[in-house]
Image: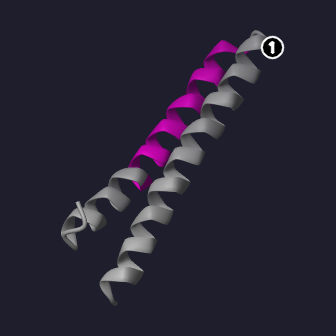
Amino acid sequence: MSKRTLWWTAKALEGLGMVLVLVGVFMSISLGLEDDGLSSMAIEMKGLALGGGLFVLGFWIERRIGAR
């Protein structure tokens, strides 16, 4: 793959990771307002784990090709 393609892939993964974190937080807030605390925390942790993982993967790809 070319560096340009890898860079766009890395940026897409980073963006998707941030979106997943936000979705997890918003779902957590929604469930928390309905007094469903444990379910709220579980959703938030899943969103943070998946989103953070994708973001780190994108960051790692970007570092690997020398863009950062």
Q: Residue at x 22, y 73 (%)?
A: 65
The quadrant the C terminus occupies is bottom left
Residue 3 image-quadrant placement: bottom left
Q: Residues within 10 Å of mark 1 (few under 14, many from 20)?
A: few
Q: Position of residue 61 (x, y in %)?
A: 29, 67
Residue 41 vs 55, above or below: the answer is above
Towards the viewer: 43 or 67:
67
Can you identify the residue that label 1 sits on? Answer: 34
The quadrant the N terminus occupies is bottom left
Whether the magenta-drawn stretch holds residue 38 is answered as yes
Q: Position of residue 10 (x, y in %)?
A: 40, 66
The residue range painted magenta reads 36-54
Q: Residue at x 52, y 45 (%)?
A: 18
Residue type at mark 1: give it. Answer: Glu
Magenta stretch: dominant secondary structure: helix
Residue 43 image-quadrant placement: top right
Q: Position of residue 23 (x, y in %)?
A: 65, 39
